[in-house]
Image (spheres, helix red, strand yellow):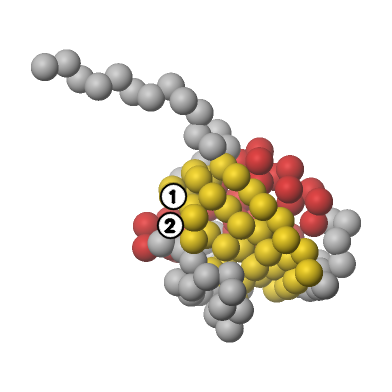
Amino acid sequence: MSAHPKSTEPDWLRVELRIEGQTCTIILSGDLCGTSISALETQVDQLGSSPWTEVIVDLERLATIDGIGANVLVGLNYYIDARGGQMTVVGASAPVAAALRNCNDGVDLRLENATAADVECLPFV
């Protein structure tokens, strides 16, 4: 019996931004890892020109995250905080939440397993 060959398909990440008033929702789908972070970084650049005070990061459709992807989200939190905003992470599966907690770089991560429609969740601080 032969071993299955390792997939050579690149990891993919879909990033959707929804801006309503002063709230920006970032919806991530797929895999957030070292080979897919450029999709998120491109969208984050657009945040600088938007008048938001609250950013909701919806991870409900995020399948996997690695240490690099987790660090990007921690960095995003620092960026939002420096601009006087607040970032809330919702919908993280147990493995994704564990990866974020393991890579929090001293940031107190409080994650709510909810959807973006549930804005009463705990902030990513």
Residue 93 x/y as whole percent? 41, 62
Secondary element type, mark 1: strand
Q: Is 60 displayed left or right of 124 in the figure? A: left
Q: Which label sits on residue 96?
A: 2
Residue sticking out furthest to the top: 2
Residue 7 or 41: which is nearer the viewer? 7
Quadrant containing the C terminus is bottom right
Residue 20 or 5: which is nearer the viewer? 20
Secondary element type, mark 2: helix
Earlier residue among tags 1 and 2: 1
Quadrant containing the N terminus is top left
Residue 61 x/y as whole percent? 49, 55
Q: What residue type is labelled 2?
A: Val
Kindly identify the residue that appears in the image at 54 percent across and 37 percent down: 12
In this orientation, does residue 98 appear? no
Q: Which label sits on residue 63?
A: 1
Residue 48 or 68: which is nearer the viewer? 48
Residue sticking out furthest to the bottom: 120
In this orientation, does residue 61 appear? yes
Q: Which label sits on residue 85?
A: none
Q: Which amino acid does label 1 sit on?
A: Ala
Q: How many angstroms separate mark 1 from mark 2 (CA)?
A: 8 Å
Kindly identify the residue that appears in the image at 56 percent across and 78 percent down: 118
Residue 66 x/y as whole percent? 46, 46
Q: Is 1 displayed left or right of 55 in the figure? A: left
Mark 2 nearby-residue class (10 Å; few <14, some 14–19, many ≥20)? many
Residue 36 x/y as whole percent? 57, 37
Residue sticking out furthest to the left: 1
